Amino acid sequence: MSTVIKPEQTPDWRAFPDARGHFGPYGGRFVSETLMEPLLELQEAYQRYLQDPQFLAELDQDLAHYVGRPSPLYLAERLTRELGGAKVYLKREDLNHTGAHKVNNTIGQALLAKRMGKTRIIAETGAGQHGVATATVAARLGLECVVYMGAEDIQRQAPNVYRMRLLGARVVPVTSGSRTLKDALNEAMRDWVTNVDNTFYIIGTVAGPHPYPAMVRDFQAIIGREAREQYQAAEGRLPDALVACVGGGSNAIGLFHPFLADEGVTMYGVEAAGDGIDTGRHSAPLCAGRPGVLHGNRTYLMEDEDGQIIETHSVSAGLDYPGVGPEHAWLKDVGRVQYVPITDREAMDAFHRLTRTEGIIPALESSHAVAYGLKLAPTLAPEQGIIINLSGRGDKDINTVARLEGIEL
Amino acid sequence: MSRIAARFEALKARGRKALIPYITAGDPEPGNTVPLMHEMVAAGADIIELGVPFSDPMADGPVIQQACERALRHRVSLRKVLEMVGEFRRDNIETPVVLMGYLNPVEIMGYETLARDAARAGVDGVLTVDLPPEESAELAGALKRHGVDPIFLLAPTSHEARIRGVSEVAAGFVYYVSLKGVTGAATLDVDAVAQKLALIRRQTDLPVGVGFGISDAETAARVSRIADAVVVGSALVKRIAAHADDPAAGRREVTQVLAGMRRAMDQATTATPA
């Protein structure tokens, strides 16, 4: 299934996906017939509003005054000194309203929903960050909101569940399958196919059927556009490397995409290796999976030899997903981005280290990116620089961390 | 002529509509499936739809999701389902068998391998729920080369151009999903279905089956007046689930429900000739 593009034919990165949503052999629209027409309508609306100055102005206003953009690009001086290598910059998506990058996308999709005349919003969530970001924009726009969340994740992320309920959302526990993010996505799809007339499905990552991977990327690409400008303003050049965690991959693609044509910028997508890739208990389809079709697109998956999706494992609920956005699958095959594993243990160490060194508590998802940054920075020279995407803040994870350390809160 | 086309032609000659039961292969355990297929034929099934278990059946409601989970506890793979069809064919060479499932197990096996081995096992049609016509050229081509009909869905949301597109690639019959929702959802609106079928019939000469939401003999009878085939799934799988500890009892109930639908459909179609 995989097509390798030779290095001499450098692709025009902005030209992807093609009209049918394909990134090379990946992506596409693999859904039942009932959803095809709604997806085509969504694509048409999205393309129209992307050219609509009024829509774009409203989005910019909201990103500035509601989300609080631009988010800072922060030079972690103490950490840089300790590591003794490249300058470490953190893109502070944790400082957005609701505490993560997710809101960049939910703001955009909710404005689209409103313009399409939809009155009801649904979403899936893993760590709860996307659920909170969706419930937040739904509250603000006065839209009904239903969030599907795996029963297992509801246990792990109790503060976010309560936050969503405070915001007026109905949180529906999903008890099928492995009771995590993938099952929440199945359930949200089932809701959508049933209530498609009045309902807009806000997918939280760059996966799902076309146009979602492209649309979510476009809403998240503000991360990379800002970071590119901010880094140039600070250093007068481009960074040497970018590091971001990859579950579905929306914060990573958001940071990477505006840099794809900059050949000198190396990119690392960090997958959750759980207990270790060789234990099989992980969530790293790009490092250790193979291509297949799930949730509306062709991409790398964690699956068994019969094509059944297997259970994943990660300390971080937001990375606990057996698939990955199709653009990442393609960027891996063409060799533009390197995908690397970080274990639960390494992520936990990075969580503590950043908290103690910089006074910033990172989300467990983002801690995976920090952990890889800790390995990478010392291998580079002091005149070089890297940007780590700090995609979310860790307040939601303190119960998990305390429990792992045997502390009762 | 394919076994599916032959079956529809024979039914038409007798003024009878096709009854198509769906069961998930390997539910509640692998040994139950082939005996149940034979018993369903005896109870009046014209075509059998055999579900290939998948870990993430997004288009299915809880009844069929749980059937998949029961079958997967026995690791019932696509390969195993093909073996079941081969076993069924030892005693039945007339009744068409259609596999219904999701694309990923097919991707892993490979399109060409599936098409070849399905044809060898005696499979007559393959319906992959999450493969719309736009993405289907390769698989549909492989199936057709091996004489297996690619079956496609149409839905209440399918506009005229999509109906035309589906009818261009489909073979055997087209499967009209009677409502917006998942399998085993509430009841369907027969009048709305009739309107849509009229639109579909202007675009295709293929027989049209209707499924999703047909749970009792009365609805089956009403649908049989307007469609060429009635597909019933969750209503049967529920009976299998209720007797998961005693599969023979489950089979008896399934065949009773099916026989009741058969009678009601035959009365309906002879009372009001199409």
Image (cartoon, coloured by chain):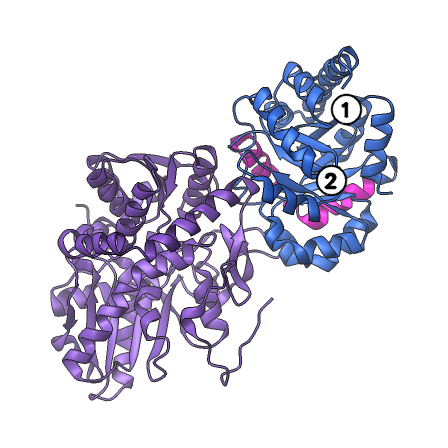
Quarter of the image for residue B255 reads top right
Amino acid bearing label 1: Lys
Q: Is residue B230 above or below residue A391?
A: above
Q: Which residues are magenta?
A: B60-88
Q: Residue at x 67, y 19 (%)?
A: B220
Query: Percent position (x, y) of residue A71?
Result: 17, 63
**Chain letter of the purple region:** A
Vertical position of residue B21 compared to residue A59: above or below: above
Residue for point 43% across, 51% down: A43
| Residue A11 percent location from the top left of the image | 46, 77
Quick one: SS at disc 2? strand
Note the chain letter of the blue one. Answer: B
Q: Residue at x 59, y 48 (%)?
A: B132
Does residue B76 show up magenta in the picture? yes
Crowdedness near tag 1: few (<14), some (14–19) or many (≥20) residues, C-alpha within 10 Å: many
Relative side of B273 to B90, left or right: left
**Is residue B239 visible to us here?**
yes
Assess whether mark 1 and mark 2 are in contact (beta carbons under 8 angstroms): no
Q: Which mark is residue B98?
A: 2
Q: Position of residue A337 (x, y in %)?
A: 41, 74
Q: Chain of mark 2?
A: B
Q: Quadrant of the C terminus of chain B?
A: top right
Whether residue A165 is in magenta: the answer is no
User: Front-most of B106 and A321?
Assistant: B106
Q: Which mark is residue B264?
A: none
Q: Earlier in the sequence, mark 2 or mark 1?
A: 1
Circles 2 and 1 on the same chain: yes
Please name the residue that numbered disc 1 is placed on: B17
